[in-house]
Image (cartoon, helix red, strand yellow):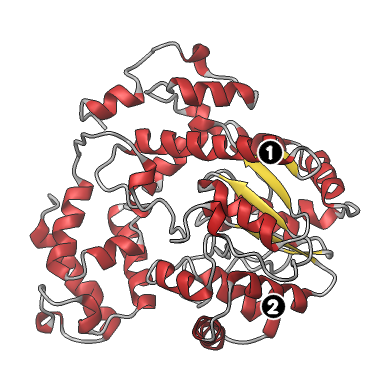
């Protein structure tokens, strides 16, 4: 059947009625779904239902921005139809990742005593950071929780405000569940109490490091590479922190970001998905090079995703040496044991990569899988320059085989 707002609304009413155990006929299509009785866990379940039924990867923010059954049905109908977009890609003008309102590095508050050394994984989205995080979580001298999203914010109150309704705060809650042996409700209450009591983000890091004792904290949050000031905060809050810079081939990242609809998840709205993904890849990798050039090889260590999955033993040996600890074979067995890859609730989306549990081991074929479907666009000059610096082979030297992503965007063909 053709997808129309009417049959989508009927489907949504049925799914929501099932979740609420009520009669679909009693549900108003104009009322906010939360007022109907839906909670955040039910929203996640609804998103899963939509993916199975229509093959669309909807993100929570899209539901909250179109909160009635009628609005969501209209929105979904538009998303499932071919779209045309126009405009200029500027990731600074969209809600790429929540940022602190503090702004410049000059405003960064330095604690009276720096926290113990820690390590930070910096990468673009869809570069394999969840796999690397879970691999390192197997090392007995490391504590590697899911995405904490702490560096962009001076205070826990700022963080709570910025992340409200985004589910990006779940990583810290999952870390508290692991460290304190508490349930999700108690972990959420801990975060709220810290925000209400005026804790800084540096205080929260100190709290975590106190609980893990002699283990090194490794914080993996893709938001960090979006703003060099995040690293300036790490420098102010920690004693000689280290940075793992994770890169992946631009075509692989762009294809994955488009398939997972990151232009919608990150607030780009009607931006062309390929052009937006290319810009994200370019800017974040350029930021990582800025950091590496500023701090040098003693503090920054590059890892290419392709090398990680094709030669995990040698790559993780070098990485452990960089972190100042012996290699441990458990790091090359990421699916061995519980490593905080679940959500905070049984019904929650797994934290980090939603596709992580579709594999049972390090999959070497993922290094070059993007080549199976040759991309129908070419990279711009900035992306080409960074790809060359990272040592990536490009298709036919990226000679125009099809219209460029930038031109495709401007002509409304993405």
Which quadrant is the C terminus positioned in?
Answer: top left
Disc ID at residue 139: none
Q: From the top left corner, tell me how far across and down residue 92 is, in percent.
A: 38, 45
Alpha-carbon distance for marks 2 and 1?
29 Å
Q: Is residue 363 above or below residue 231?
A: above
Disc ID at residue 294: 1
Q: Residue at x 18, y 76 (%)?
A: 32
Q: What is the count of numbered marks?
A: 2
Q: Residues within 10 Å of mark 2 (few under 14, many from 20)?
A: few
Q: Is residue 244 left or right of residue 87?
A: right
Whether residue 208 can be seen here:
yes
Whether residue 359 can be seen here:
no
**Nearer the viewer's eye, disc 2 or disc 1?**
1
Q: Is residue 84 above or below residue 5?
A: above
Q: Residue at x 56, y 83 (%)?
A: 194
Q: Residue furthest front?
A: 106
Q: Is residue 243 left or right of residue 93?
A: right
Q: From the top left corner, tell me how far across and down residue 356 is, in percent.
A: 57, 55
Q: Secondary structure beneath disc 2?
A: helix
In the image shown, does 322 or 265 lie closer to the viewer? 322
Q: Residue at x 43, y 43 (%)?
A: 257
Q: Quadrant of residue 160?
A: bottom left
Residue of label 2: 207
Q: Secondary structure beneath disc 1?
A: helix
Q: Quadrant of residue 305?
A: top right
Q: From the top left corner, tell me how far across and down residue 388 is, in percent.
A: 59, 21
Q: Is residue 318 left or right of residue 226?
A: right
Q: From the top left corner, tell me how far across and down residue 338 is, in percent.
A: 69, 69
């Amino acid at each position: 059947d053709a997808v129309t707002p009417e049959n989508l609304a009927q489907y949504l009413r049925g799914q929501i009625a099932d979740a609420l155990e009520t009669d679909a006929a009693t549900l108003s299509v104009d009322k906010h779904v939360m007022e109907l009785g839906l909670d955040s866990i039910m929203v996640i379940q609804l998103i899963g239902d939509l993916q199975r039924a229509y093959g669309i990867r909807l993100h929570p923010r899209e539901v909250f921005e179109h909160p009635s059954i009628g609005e969501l049905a209209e929105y979904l109908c538009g998303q499932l139809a071919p779209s045309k977009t126009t405009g200029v890609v500027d990731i600074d003008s969209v809600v790429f990742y929540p940022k602190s309102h503090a702004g410049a590095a000059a405003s960064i508050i330095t604690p009276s005593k720096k926290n113990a050394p820690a390590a930070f994984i910096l990468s673009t989205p869809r570069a394999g950071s969840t796999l690397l995080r879970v691999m390192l979580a197997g090392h007995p001298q490391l504590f590697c929780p899911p995405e904490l999203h702490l560096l962009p914010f001076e205070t826990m109150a700022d963080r709570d405000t910025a992340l409200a309704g985004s589910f990006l705060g779940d990583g810290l809650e999952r870390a508290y569940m692991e460290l304190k042996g508490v349930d999700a409700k108690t972990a959420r209450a801990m975060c709220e109490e810290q925000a209400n009591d005026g804790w800084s983000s540096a205080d929260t890091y100190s709290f975590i490091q106190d609980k893990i004792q002699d283990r090194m904290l490794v914080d993996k949050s893709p938001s960090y590479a979006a703003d060099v000031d995040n690293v300036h905060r790490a420098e102010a809050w920690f004693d000689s922190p280290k940075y793992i810079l994770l890169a992946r081939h631009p075509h692989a990242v762009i294809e994955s970001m488009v398939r997972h609809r990151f232009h919608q998840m990150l607030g780009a709205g009607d931006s062309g998905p390929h052009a937006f993904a290319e810009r994200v890849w370019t800017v974040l990798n350029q930021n990582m090079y800025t950091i590496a050039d500023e701090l040098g090889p003693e503090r920054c260590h590059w890892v290419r995703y392709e090398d990680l999955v094709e030669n995990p033993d040698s790559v993780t040996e070098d990485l452990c040496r960089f972190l100042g600890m012996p290699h441990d074979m458990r790091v090359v067995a990421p699916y061995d044991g519980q490593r905080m890859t679940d959500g905070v609730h049984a019904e929650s989306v797994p934290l980090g990569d939603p596709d992580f549990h579709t594999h049972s081991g390090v999959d070497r074929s993922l290094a070059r899988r993007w080549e199976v479907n040759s991309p129908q666009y070419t990279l711009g000059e900035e992306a080409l320059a960074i790809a060359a610096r990272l040592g990536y082979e490009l298709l036919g030297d990226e000679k125009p085989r099809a219209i460029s992503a930038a031109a495709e965007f401007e002509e409304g063909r993405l």
